[in-house]
Image: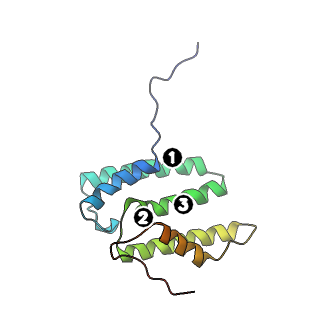
Amino acid sequence: MEQIPTSFEKKTTKADVIVAFRKFIDKGVVSPDSLDLNDPEVIKANKVLDAWAEQEEKISAGNRETRHKFNFERTMIVINAGFRDPGYLRDVLGWLDQDLENVDEESPEPLPNRGHVSKRIIGNARIFDGACLKFPKS
């Protein structure tokens, strides 16, 4: 006789992670580095992030393209949540550039100009409130 599962795990989405961290933005936090790791709300948000990351790592295991997409999405979480500290965003830009470099090294075809892609990513994130990163004209 076929058994019907009595419970199942709810899939944690990227949107769940963004919502979990956006509440700190609403409280005026501009950098994840400013979060109190002992605060129960921060602990809860980090558990949501960890659950999503673990789930996505399992899904992307063995698939290079899916793994690269997950790395990009994980890096963009802080921008999508609304953190806007200029120094932290510079770090994020560096991580995005590293992600692109990793993709470029593993791709059979060269990627387009990474600097242009990085600028477009940050520009599309619509980072305002005085925290825009300034790029040299190319």
Mark 3 element type: helix
Task: Look at the numbered discs 1 and 2 and tell me whether their residues touch, using CB distance below 8 Å.
Answer: no
Asked whether 38 or 29 is in front, the reply is 29
Query: What's the distance in space between the residues labelled 1 and 3, CA to CA?
Result: 13 Å
Mark 2 element type: helix
Q: Which mark is residue 71?
A: 3
Mark 1 element type: helix
Q: Position of residue 24 (x, y in %)?
A: 28, 59
Residue at label 2?
79
Say left or right for 105 vs 18. Answer: right
Q: Residue at x 56, y 47 (%)?
A: 58
Residue at label 1?
55
Q: Residue at x 67, y 70 (%)?
A: 104
Amino acid type for the residue under numbered disc 1: Gln
Amino acid type for the residue under numbered disc 2: Ile
Query: What's the distance in space between the residues labelled 2 and 3, CA to CA?
Result: 14 Å
Asked whether 81 or 74 is in front, the reply is 81
